[in-house]
Amino acid sequence: MIYLLLPLLYTIQIVAQHRAQQNIIMDIDKLMLQLQQLHPGETEFHQAVKEMLLSIAPVYNEHPEFEKAKIIERLLEPDRIVCFRVVWETDEGEFKINRGWRVQYNNAIGPYKGGLRFHASVNLSILKFLAFEQIFKNALTTLPMGGAKGGSDFSPVGKSQSEIRRFCQAFMLELWRNLGPDTDVPAGDIGVGGREIGYLYGMYKKLTGQHTGTFTGKGLEYGGSVLRPEATGFGALYFVNQMLQDKDIDIAGKTIALSGFGNVAWGVATKACQLGAKVVTISGPDGYIYDPDGISGSKIDYMLELRASGNDIVAPYAERYPKATFFPDRKPWERKVDIALTCATQNELNAADAQQLIDNKVKLVAEVSNMGCTAEATEVFLKNRILFAPGKAVNAGGVATSGLEMSQNAMHLSWPQQEVDQRLHHIMSTIHQQCLQYGKEPDGYINYVKGANIAGFMKVAKAMLAQGEY
Ligand code: 2IT
């Protein structure tokens, strides 16, 4: 009798197991509590993780194998963080002490990859959020790159060229042993441009005796890729253009408000002009410039001059171009424009700004800076069904072109501009496709936040699972 019952009992057990698996419900509150205990007070990091959890929960709940392997719990903790002291000397001979960090967050799909940020505001919360976002952004690019970020609380504002060089060399004296072309490949971010990469890479080369592709954003003369400086802005405009085309909207003639006046704003403004749009604002920590005639041609060159001055202010633009107005301590989001693009830093657009843009009938908002919008602002855009896309999709062209620089270095050759641009175009299209695939809501609205988060997460989670417990 018992033998007859065995298959039945076995079937019941399988069904029960299956039911249990189907009923996994990601406990976001519990995970967030755990995160807060592990990383207390790190608000930017908490914000980035929560956005991701909210997006992926429905998909995660359908994958018991992720839950069993504790993929989420693993992702709450970076693989490792290197923290070090940087001592350097001013032109007057005074010693200064700063802190340096490298957050090597996850290398499931490739070597650690991500920029270095030098800014007075840098702390571990900011670097962890940036490294966390980088994991999924890099996954979206289709290239084999893991996620990392690093930097220092060193402020380049008002520093001489020699001071910056000495700082970069001192920074590298500590960090070099953690890097390598197949281990960890840094690049630039806020406060780290071509000049700083040159000094950092030069010191790295001296210490290791190796000329390998361990940095990206290098000068064209020593292994850099064409288009890398422009790539973040160009890629962002390719992406924005696809979002518009998907809705049969022509970008030509549209007005654009952008923030910032650095490398990213430069690339965005240049490509926006090429596509026939009109950029009417730039901004700095001191306020914003409104130029009704549009910021193009030599005005874009002047913007770069302002950045290179090292003063971190935009006010002089209005003295140079009297038709433009400087609005001190205000943000560009108060202007009536068709398109708004954050190009400066995290959380630079809040819920009130979002509402103002919507009241002014904005057509599209995209983060070109990493996490440019607060969680509340993002929510306002999504609720109002505004065309809105997150930084990890929109600005991925920067790191994607870094990936192309790594490929060229590995092959010991350099591609012409057309080849790099074509590849960048293709990568941005692929990212857009992934967003459409995973981000479509039942009412037809494309939720790019959800789409980018799910697509990036699925790739990383599968890679982690495939490589076993580690
Ligand atoms: O946020 C970013 O993606 C970057 N700062 C670029 C990183 C890179 O490795 O090119």
Image (cartoon, rainbow, N blue to C red):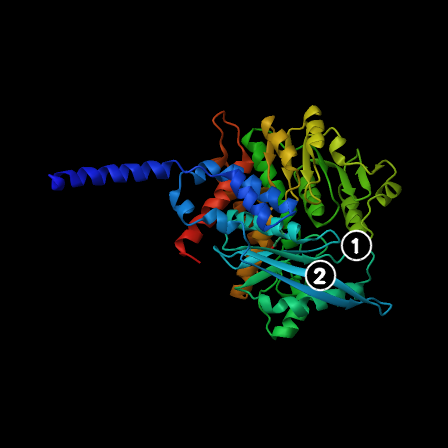
Q: Residues within 10 Å of mark 2 (few under 14, many from 20)?
A: some
Residue 459 horizontal/vertical position (percent): 46, 48
Whether residue 253 appears in this view of the structure is no
Q: In what element is the residue under mark 1? A: helix
Residue denoted by label 1: 308
Residue furthest bottom as drawn:
209
Q: Residue at x 56, y 46 (%)?
A: 35
Is residue 321 shown to the viewer in this render?
A: yes
Residue 92 vs residue 148: left or right? right
Circle nearer the N terminus (2, 1):
2
Rounded to the nearest angstrom, the CA distance separating label 2 from label 1 is: 24 Å
Residue 365: where, in percent of width, then height?
A: 64, 34
Q: State yes or no: discs 2 and 1 in contact (Cβ < 8 Å).
A: no
Residue at 56 percent of width and 48 percent of height? 424
Q: Which mark is residue 401?
A: none
Q: Which of 258 and 51 lies nearest the eye of the viewer?
A: 51
The kind of residue on which mark 2 rests is Arg
Quadrant holding the N terminus: top left
| SS under mark 2 | strand
Residue 154 placed where, x, y %? 75, 58
Q: Is residue 55 left or right of residue 417?
A: left
Viewer-side label of 2, 1 = 2
Say if 88 sits above or below 298 in the image: below
Q: Which residue is mark 2?
A: 99
Percent x, y of residue 339:
67, 33
In this image, 171 relative to 95: left or right? left
Q: Nearer the viewer, residue 367 or 127?
A: 127
Q: Seen from this angle, which residue lies furthest left?
A: 1
Residue at screen point 58% across, 66% down: 178
Q: Is residue 406 above or below residue 33?
A: below
Residue closer to the observer: 87 or 169: 87
